[in-house]
Image (cartoon, rainbow, N blue to C red):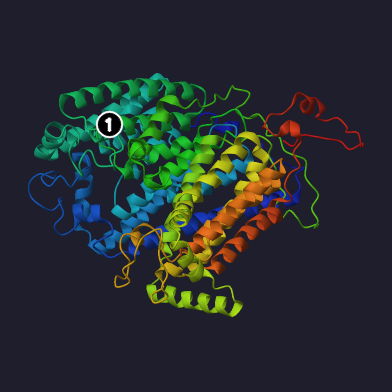
Amino acid sequence: MANAEHGGRAGGAFGAGAAGPARTRLEAARVGLWLVAAILAVREVAVVLGSPRGERLTDLETWVGPDGVLHVKGSLYDSTQFTGTPFGGLVLKPLTRAAEQALGWGWTFGTLLLVVALGLVAARALPQPVTRRTSLLAAPVAISLLMLSLPVRNTLYLGQTSIIPVLLVLLGCFAVRGERASGVLIGVGAALQPTVLLFAPLLWFTGRRRAAVSTGGTFAAGTALAWAAMPHDSYTYWVHHVAGVGLGGKADDLANQSLHGALLRLGLEGPLEIGLFLFLGAVVAVLGLRRAVHYAADGQLLLAVAITGCVAVAVSPTTWQHQLLWVLLAVVGRAGKRVSDRFVWPVAVLLVVTLPAKMMMPNTAVLYPLRENVVLLAALAAATAVPFLSRTSPRYRAPVPTDYAAPVPARFSWVPLLPFWRKALGRPSLLLELLLIRVCYAAYSSVRLAATSNRATAEEHGHQIHSIEKALFVDVEQWLNHTVVKVPWLEGFLSFYYESFHFVVPLTILAVLYARRPADYRWARSSLGFATLLGLLGFWLYPLAPPRLMPGLGFVDTVHGVQDFAKPDYGAMTALTNQYAAMPSLHFGWSLWCGIVIAVLAPRWWMKGLGLLHPLFTVTAIVATANHWVLDAVGGAVVVGAGFGLTYVLSGPRAAVPDAMRSGEVSNALAAAVGTKSSDGRTRSRAR
C-alpha cells in the first residue's frame, strides 16, 4: 500500500503554456488556505491554554499530575480514570517527572504538530492521479478540517493520545518504505489502541503479508513488555476489564459511539446485549474489511484505511469522541454519479464530525436513537453501505454535469458579483438540503439565544421604539391588543395563528418549490437565508423588549399568559429562547417572504391574493398579541428586502426557466437542442 502510484501524479493544470494569472490565483488560494489553517490552529491553542488550569488538559492531569494515576502505587486502573493500555501507561510514566505547567504547553504544541503531520500525510495519500491544483491545496484544507473536527478539539482540550495511533497507521501505510517498518509502526499503534489490530487483516489480504506479520509481532512484543514491567496492571486491563471495557465513563454514555454503547442506550443488557454486540461486530468487521480490500485493490488506499478505521470505531467496546478521526478520513470517498450528488457524503461527514449531535437532529423523542448515535451511523455507513465509486467507473472523474439556465441580463453591468453562482435547473440533493436546513436552524436558534441581553437594555430600547412610534402616530399596539382581548374568538384565532403558521407556511412553500420548480427553489431559499442572517445581526446589535415584557404599559400577553415582572427572567421561556429578539420581526419577515414568493411565482391571480393575505394576518397577530411593535414589522420587511437584494446582487436576476423545465426534468426537446442555434441566431449551450 505504501507509496503506491505516487509516481503517477498528473502533470498539472499549469504547464509551460499556462497563463500567469492562473498561477497567481492558485498561489493566492494556497496562501489563503494556509492562513486559515494557521488561524484555526492558533485559536485552538489559545482556547486550551487560556482556560483555567482545572478545566483544561484534564485527562493529562489525571494521569501525570501530582496525584495522577501514574504516580500512585497499585494498579493504573483502580480509579478507572486511565483508559489506555498498559503499554500506553508504560510509555507515559517518564512524563510524570516533568513540571505540570511545562508539560501542558509542551503537550499542547506537540499535539498540534501531530495534527499538522496527520494532515500532510493524508493529503499525500489521496488517490492518484491528482491535479497540481489539488496537490497544492489538499494539505491546508486537510489541516483546517482536522482543526475544526470535534475529535481533534477534544484531544487538544483533554490532553489525550488518540491522534498518535491514527498517525502511526497513516505513516505505516503511506510514508515509510519497507513492509517490516510499516508493520512496526502500525503494531505500535495497536499496542496503544488494540482495535488498530484490524489493519493486520487489511495488510494480509492486500498482499502485504510481511507487514501484517510485523504488525502482529510488534503488538505482541509491546504488550509482553508491558506485561513484564506491570503484570498486575496488565492482568487488570486484559482480563478483568477485557481490553479496557468499563474504563472511563459509563459504557452507555452518549460519548461512546460504538455498537456496544448504542445497544446499551437502547435498553439491552446482559448476555443478550453481549451476544448481539459480538454478532453485529463480526458482521460489520467482515463487510467492512471486504470493502476496504476492494478499494485498496482499486487504488483508493486512503479510503481503504478510513473504512477499516470506521470498522474499528463500530466494533470497539468503547469508542470515545476523541477517537473518531477515522470517520473524518472517510470524506475522501466519492459517492454519487451526478455533480450535485457528489457533495452529499463529504458535507454529511463534515457536519457529523464538527458539530454536536443536537444540531444534526431535531429535539424530538422519536429521533433520539438517531441523534444519540449519529457518529456511529456515519461510521457504519462508511464501513458497510455507502456505494463509493471505483476509479474504473466513468463517473469517478466525470460525473453527470449539472444543467444551468441561461444567464438573464441584469440592469447593472456589475451584477452579478459572483458570476460562478449559476442557476442550476435540477433539484439539489434532498438529504443535503434537509441537513443544511436543520443545521442552519440550529445555528439560528443558538445565535438568537446567545444574543440575549440584560433586561435593562432591552427595556430601554423598548421605550425608544415606543417614543418613535408616538412621534410617527403609529403606536396602535395597546389599542389593538385590548380590542382583541375583548373578543375571545378573535384572541384565540390570532394567538393560534401566531404560534402555528410561522414555520409551517415557509416550509410548505420550500417543499412545493423543491418538487415543482427547483430553479426557483434555489432563488427563494437563498433570499430567505440572507434575510434570516440579517435578522440575527439585528438581534445581536439591538436587543429589544416586546410590548408584552414592558412593565407599566398595560399590555396583555395573549400567547404566553401573565408575566411576573418581579422575576428577571420571566420564568422558563428565557431558557428556551431569547425573549428580547424582537427587532427585526422575523415572524413578519418570513411571512412577507412567503407572500412575495407566492405573488411572483403563483400562476393564478387568486393564488397571489391568498399569498399576500398571510403577511397581513401575521402582522395583525404579532401586534395584537403584544409580541412585537409596529416598527419590528418594518424591520422585518427591511431584512427581507435586503435578502432579495443580496441574492440579486450576488447571483444576478432570477432565471427565466422554460415551462418544460419547471419540474426539474430536462425535456427531450431541450436536450436535442443543446449546441444548436435558436430562432434569433444565438447559440445555446449547456453550461457544464
- Which quadrant of the rendered structure holds the N terminus? top left
The disc labelled 1 sits on which kind of residue? Thr
Which percent across, then down, holds residue 579?
A: 41, 64
The residue under the point 55% across, 67% down is: 630
Res 125 seen here: no
Task: Tell me if residue 654 comes above or below residue 101 in the rendering.
Answer: above
The residue under the point 29% across, 23% down is: 280
Identify the residue under disc 1: 218
Q: Of residues 435 and 41, which is closer to you in this image?
A: 435
The residue under the point 48% across, 39% down is: 348
In the image, is 18 to the left or to the right of 477?
right
Task: Tell me if residue 195 comes above or below residue 110 in the rendering.
Answer: above
In the image, is 438 to the left or to the right of 470?
left
Q: Residue furthest front?
A: 487
Which percent across, then down, holds residue 235?
A: 11, 34
Quarter of image, res 566: bottom left
Which percent across, then down, holds residue 661?
A: 72, 33
Q: Of residues 544 and 207, which is closer to you in this image?
A: 544
Q: Of residues 184 and 564, which is closer to you in this image?
A: 564
Res 20 seen here: yes
Q: How many residues crowd around disc 1 within 10 Å: few (fewer than 14), some, or many (20 or more)?
A: many
Q: Secondary structure at mark 1?
A: helix
Quarter of image, res 606: top right
In the image, is 496 to the left or to the right of 646?
left
- How many numbered marks are there? 1
- Which quadrant of the rendered structure holds the C terminus? top right
Which percent across, then down, holds residue 506?
A: 55, 47
